[in-house]
Amino acid sequence: MTVNQSIIQIHPSDNVWIALRDFEKGESIEKEQVKIILQENVRRGHKIAVSPIKKGENILKYGFPIGHATQDIEIGEFVHSHNVKTNLEGELNYSYKPKKISSIDAPAETPTFLGYKRENGDVGVRNELWLINTVGCINKVAENLAKMGNNMLKASNFDGVQYFAHPYGCSQLGDDLEYTKKILGNLIHHPNAGGVVVLGLGCENNYIDLFKEAIGEYNPNRVKFMSVQAEEDEMEKGLELMQEVFDYATSFEREEVPVSALRIGLKCGGSDGLSGITANPLLGSFSDRLISYGGSTALTEVPEMFGAETILMERARDEETFQDIVHLINDFKHYFIKYDQPVYENPSPGNKEGGITTLEEKSLGCVQKGGFSTVQNVIPYGSRINKDGLTLIQGPGNDLVSVTALATSGCQIVLFTTGRGTPFGGPTPTVKISTNTALAEKKKNWIDFNAGKLVEDASMEQMTDSFFEYIVDVASGKKLTNNEVFGFKEIAIFKDGVTM
């Protein structure tokens, strides 16, 4: 990648440059003895043709085709959706062509963080009390109990009471009900929750006795249940149960733990033309380093792998894992087809506004969050991570649904890159990483870390060192993310069926 103060060429074979600032028609740009004159206005993050591109010829970015020209494009012209179209269509056939992956040697000494070691061996980065309601009818009961609990329950080793509103748990059938049970059940098992109170209404599909089957084994000192219809005063009973699990949760103290205990979710949303150049590669570098220490990371957003899936397939641990990735991709394409929707109807209007033209371009940037490590496992939506290293999780690109899927897979922290900005946060610390400095400076209450420095004055090694240190501080509770400070903690559950 070559950078000057105003443009980037990511790969030597690319026939487009990426603007690092807004350009006006008539301006000239010079890089390595190549000089072009802008034929029209081009905004930051968008593409400029650096050589003539004939109609039908591929547009190259990252060294890969991101679509083809729908008309002749001259040097200095703006390259975007008005003159570019995706190359993707229909389903593809894949063959197993593994690539040799260079191992990443970790430094001799493994870093540590201060975490909460749970009785089952898991490690939390927060010690919270979570209220989990089995059905949306009692969202406000959970909300009011959380408010009362946060006023009542205080301790130096306690990070507060959280509740997670959702509209489901009743009038659901088939997979939808199973998804609800799995996601809520995984929240109950999450290591950031030192204690849990499960609230049921009493007449819902997901009633407590049935839900217990989905939860599996649990510690009765850590998890308590209340059916709201059965109680004369559900607030009084709820506070009583919260006090009991609070007493259990506060028996834990932070202690030194190797970073190999970390499971980190990788997510991008509101992307722009710099996402695949700054923030996503930074997450990839972080992911590779954490994995070298024995830690784990996870990718989801399957539709945003379309067009770059072979990069992940080539890194599959073995042929069985390769086939799992093939099924992951094709099953999600079938999901689109089942509803008679275009498989490649992406990127979003906001992505296009930020400079992303086609799904290939978005996907090639998106998969960089997974670095260069081996893909160790592929798991269904609603499952928990069960192997160290890089895991792929079935799930959509939707920010709320995918962050929830990452968190409930067991990730203690989710890293969320964005070029457009969002206040959203999931049930765990959700670190917002900006792709550009302007966003970081504009949205200080949203953005936690600025990756835009990568196209200014910082190297990838420097930024990875700084970012790794920051995440260790977040995991140790020394720093809070903006979603924690401002109470942006939400969940969303995937839905694919009939509501009665």
Image (cartoon, rainbow, N blue to C red):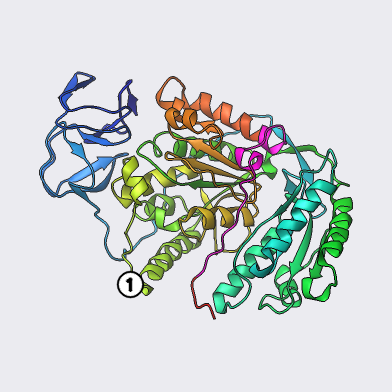
Residue 159 lies within the magenta run: no
Q: Which quarter of the picture shows residue 168?
A: bottom right
The local secondary structure at tag 1 comes to: loop
Other residues around mark 1 within 10 Å, as few (<14) / some (14–19) / many (≥20): few
Give the extent of the magenta segment: 473-495
Residue 216, given in percent of the width and then of the height, sits at 75, 69
Q: Which quarter of the picture shows residue 276?
A: top left
Residue 491 lies within the magenta run: yes
Q: Quadrant of the C terminus?
A: bottom right
Please determine whether, in this image, residue 65 is positioned above or below residue 279.
Answer: below
Q: Report whether 282 appears left or right of 33.
A: right
Residue 179 visible in the shown view: yes
Q: Quadrant of the N terminus?
A: top left
Q: Report whether 153 appears left or right of 347.
A: right
Disc 1: which residue: 340
Residue 57, given in percent of the width and then of the height, sits at 15, 46
Count of marks overlaid on the render: 1
Q: Report whether 77 appears left or right of 499.
A: left
Please determine whether, in this image, residue 336 is positioned above or below residue 74.
Answer: below
Kindly report the secondary structure that dominates the magenta region of the rendered protein. Answer: loop
Residue 189 visible in the shown view: no
Residue 219, given in percent of the width and then of the height, sits at 83, 62
Q: In terms of depth relative to the viewer, which is nearer, 71 or 284?
A: 71
Kind of residue at disc 1: Asp
What residue lies at 55% left-to-right and 36% top-to-bottom?
A: 286
What residue lies at 85% left-to-right and 52% top-to-bottom?
A: 246
Please determine whether, in this image, residue 471 is positioned above or below residue 186.
Answer: above
What residue lies at 74% left-to-right and 77% top-to-bottom?
A: 202
Residue 347, given in percent of the width and then of the height, sits at 34, 51
